[in-house]
Each structure stands twice: as structure tokens, then as C-alpha cells.
Image (spheres, helix red, strand yellow):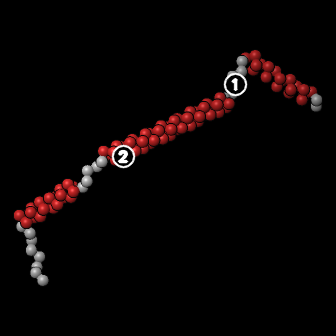
Amino acid sequence: MPSFKQPTFQERAALANKAKQAAIEKLRAKPPVDEAVLAERTAARLAREEAAAKLREEKIAAREAEKAERKRRAEEKAAAAQKPVLTEAEKKAARDARYAARKSRVGKR
């Protein structure tokens, strides 16, 4: 069995050139793409891209609607939790009612 022989630069360059020529010949042997097939592929690609864009827009719209709904619920919750601001007359009436209730409880003893 012969030992390994390191190829020279010329041998490597020739081998690379041979491989390059083989790749070029392989590409030349490939049949050209038919215009109808190319148009069909392009139409299919555009349809897929359009469907994906529509889906993205729907997702964004749904996300925005959900965000608006959460904001509306939070505002309703905050409004419900907020104590009503009483006027001076309402405060006085409530105070008088408490006083009257206390007096009636004390008077029953």
C-alpha cells in the first residue's frame, strides 16, 4: 500500500477547476423553468404572503380589542371602587341620621 502523497498546488488547482466545470455543466443540463410554472409559483407565493399578512393584521386587531376591553374593565372597576363625593348638605343629613339613631337607641334603655 503506497503512503499518502501530499498533492501539489497545481494538482489542487486542477482538481478545483475540474469540480467547478462539473458544477457548471450540471447547471447547464438543468431544464429551464417554464414561464407558466414560474407565474404559478409566483402567484402561489403572493397568495401565501397575502394570507399571512391578513392573519397578522387580524391578530393585531384582536390584541388591540383585548387591550381596549381590559382598559374599559379597569376603568369601570376603578369607577365602581371610587367613593361618591358627598356635598356638605348630604354629610350633614348623614350625621343627623346617625345622631338620631343613637338618640333613639339610648332613649330605649
- What residue type is disc 1 on? Pro
79 displayed left or right of 64: right
Report which quarter residue 26 is drawn in: bottom left
77 displayed left or right of 63: right
Q: Residue at x 37, y 45 (%)?
A: 40
Alpha carbon separation for disc pair 1 and 2 = 66 Å
Front of the two marks 1 and 2:
2
- What residue type is disc 2 on? Arg
| Mark 2 residue crowding within 10 angstroms, few (<14) / some (14–19) / many (20+) | few
**Closer to us: 18 or 89:** 18
- Residue 56 at least partly seen: no
**Closer to us: 104 or 58:** 58
Q: Position of residue 69 (x, y in %)?
A: 59, 34
Above or below, comparing residue 63 to residue 92 in the picture: below
Label 1 sits on residue = 84
34 displayed left or right of 108: left
**Closer to us: 57 or 67:** 57
Q: Which mark is residue 59?
A: none
Above or below, comparing residue 42 to residue 4 in the picture: above
Q: Which mark is residue 41?
A: 2
Q: Disc 2 on helix, strand or loop?
A: helix
